[in-house]
Amino acid sequence: MALPRPSPTSTCLVTGASSGIGREIARELARRGLGVTLVARRETPLRGLAEELAAAHDIRAAVVPCDLTDPDARGELVGKVADLGLTVDVLVNNAGLSTFGPVHRADRARELTMVRTDVEAVVDLCTLFVPAMASRRRGAVLNTASTAAFQPLPGQAGYSAAKAFVLTYSEALRAELHPMGVTVTALCPGPVKTGFVAAAGVDEEEAAAALPRIMWQPAEAVARAGVDGLDQDRAVVIPGLANRVGAMAGRFAPRHLVTSLVARQHPGLKPRH
């Protein structure tokens, strides 16, 4: 099994743990008796979750607030975790966000924040924590990508490109680390019932209408599938049959056909009034 045995000094570092999929992944790991270190910008929800998990599962739940867009703050994570007397045996790079709309109307700061969170932080945290896993010949990495990784998405051009990067990076990293006893899994959810869409400034009803209801998954189911896949040493996990079919169709269908279809129905590309 890829997941380590529970230990008082080992921890699963989960980014984006204050809400959505990240929060549910932390709950799923704690449910299996594994200690967690919760990372996100907002300390208050992290504290509440840590108290909940420690009480419910008798595990050690640590909190390390961090702005993942800040390279210096990311670099301090290794020392902060070590100061707690903890060793990161599982790294969950889950923090992420999306922008919606055409590139010619994009907000520069928002676009760069997305790339720094969705791409740069993933690479940086793997570079920071994976070497110790490799030297111990023990560890696991779960990177949250998306079904958006399997095709370009007009209306979310930067997001689909970022998640394609995460998927490809994870697959390559897996091949490098597998001989060293470290596993890497890419979690590729489709649409999930969280505040993710609203945070991007898109009406949730519009977003729901753009995709079949069968594709939407609850965050709890996505988290369970991701942790199960990590434990079973799977390379890629796509929760939900409809999403698996859609991802494969997106990967193998002609790109011009996919982009044309998406451009016609994406809520982020509807004319502004």
Image (cartoon, rainbow, N blue to C red):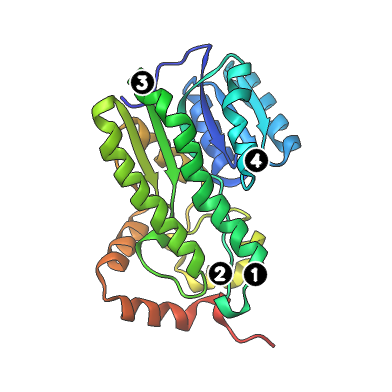
Crowd rating for badge 3 (residues with CA inside 10 Å; few <14, some 14–19, many 20+)? few
Please name the residue shown 69% across and 24% down the image: 51
Q: CA distance from mark 2 to mark 3?
A: 45 Å
What amino acid is labelled 4 in the image?
Answer: Ser
| Residue on which the image places disc 1 | 203
Q: Given this view, does label 3 or label 1 mark the residue nearer the observer?
A: 3
Q: CA distance from mark 1 to mark 4?
A: 22 Å
Q: Nearer the observer, disc 1 or disc 4?
A: 4
Q: Residue at x 53, y 11 (%)?
A: 8
| Amino acid type, residue under disc 3 in the picture | Ser
Screen quadrant of the N terminus: top left
Amino acid carrying label 2: it is Ala
* Front: mark 4 or 3: 3
Tell me, yes or no, whether the two marked residues, 1 and 2, touch with CB atoms within 8 Å: yes
Q: Give the labeled residue for mark 4.
A: 18
Tag 3 secondary structure: helix
- Binning the other alpha carbons within 10 Å of mark 4 as few (below 14), some (14 to 19) or many (20 upward) gives many
Asked if labels 3 and 4 touch by Cβ distance under 8 angstroms, the answer is no
Which mark, by number, is residue 153? none
What is the C-alpha distance between the residues marked 2 and 4? 23 Å
Residue linked to disc 2: 207
Instruction: Specify whether 13 is left or right of 151.
Output: right
| Quadrant of the frame with the C terminus | bottom right
Q: Looking at the rendering, which quadrant does residue 66 occupy?
A: top right
Q: In the picture shown, does residue 47 fall above or below 111?
A: above
Q: CA distance from mark 1 to mark 2?
A: 6 Å
Q: Is residue 154 above or below residue 264?
A: above
